[in-house]
Image (spheres, helix red, strand yellow):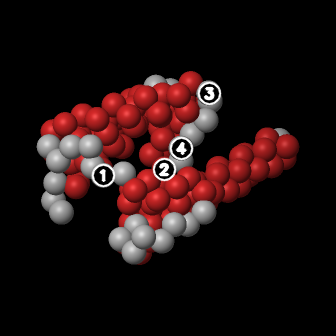
Amino acid sequence: MSRNVEGKGLAKVRVLQLLKEILQVLLGTALMAVSLNVFLLPNKIAAGGMSGLGVILFHLLPALTSDLLLASIYGGVGTGVGLGLVFFAGGSTGGTALMAQLLTRFLGLSPGQGLLGSDLFIVASSGFF
């Protein structure tokens, strides 16, 4: 009987540790995104890694179109293909993509369903700003 109680206590500790790690990752990536877009990108400061490369490319390449609808379509297709390649390889880009993979693992949703839900919430929220 005591082994069963110890097992439940250990499982609770593992779940709490997992939730703590998820929260840390989400807060950390959100802070990085805000820092990149508020401080680095507008001031042409490139951080290391892919985000720094993104800053450089943002300032080197002119916008391919000023049409909002076309830009949305091109951006959506590019993002979708890139994310598909990452998911197909079993990877994650972090953020909502990581959340979608966790929803897949724990709730049985497909990565697409989890990503669609979280991204719809974010896009809908952006209409208020």
Q: Quadrant of the C terminus?
A: bottom left
User: Which residue position holds label 1?
Assistant: 62
Q: Earlier in the sequence, mark 1 or mark 2?
A: 1
Contact? badges 2 and 4 (CB < 8 Å): yes
> Which one is in front in this view, the residue at disc 3 or the one at disc 1?
1
Q: Which residue lies at the image location 62% right of the left edge and 30% below the top edge? A: 90
Horizontal side of 38 relative to 105 (left or right) equals left
Q: Secondary structure at mark 2?
A: helix
Q: Earlier in the sequence, mark 3 or mark 2?
A: 3
x and y percent of residue 5 in the render? Answer: 77, 47
User: Which residue position holds label 4?
Assistant: 93
Spatial distance from mark 1 to mark 2, Cα to Cα? Answer: 27 Å
User: Which residue position holds label 3?
Assistant: 89
Residue 95 is marked as 2
x and y percent of residue 57 in the render? Answer: 44, 53
Spatial distance from mark 3 to mark 2, Cα to Cα? Answer: 17 Å
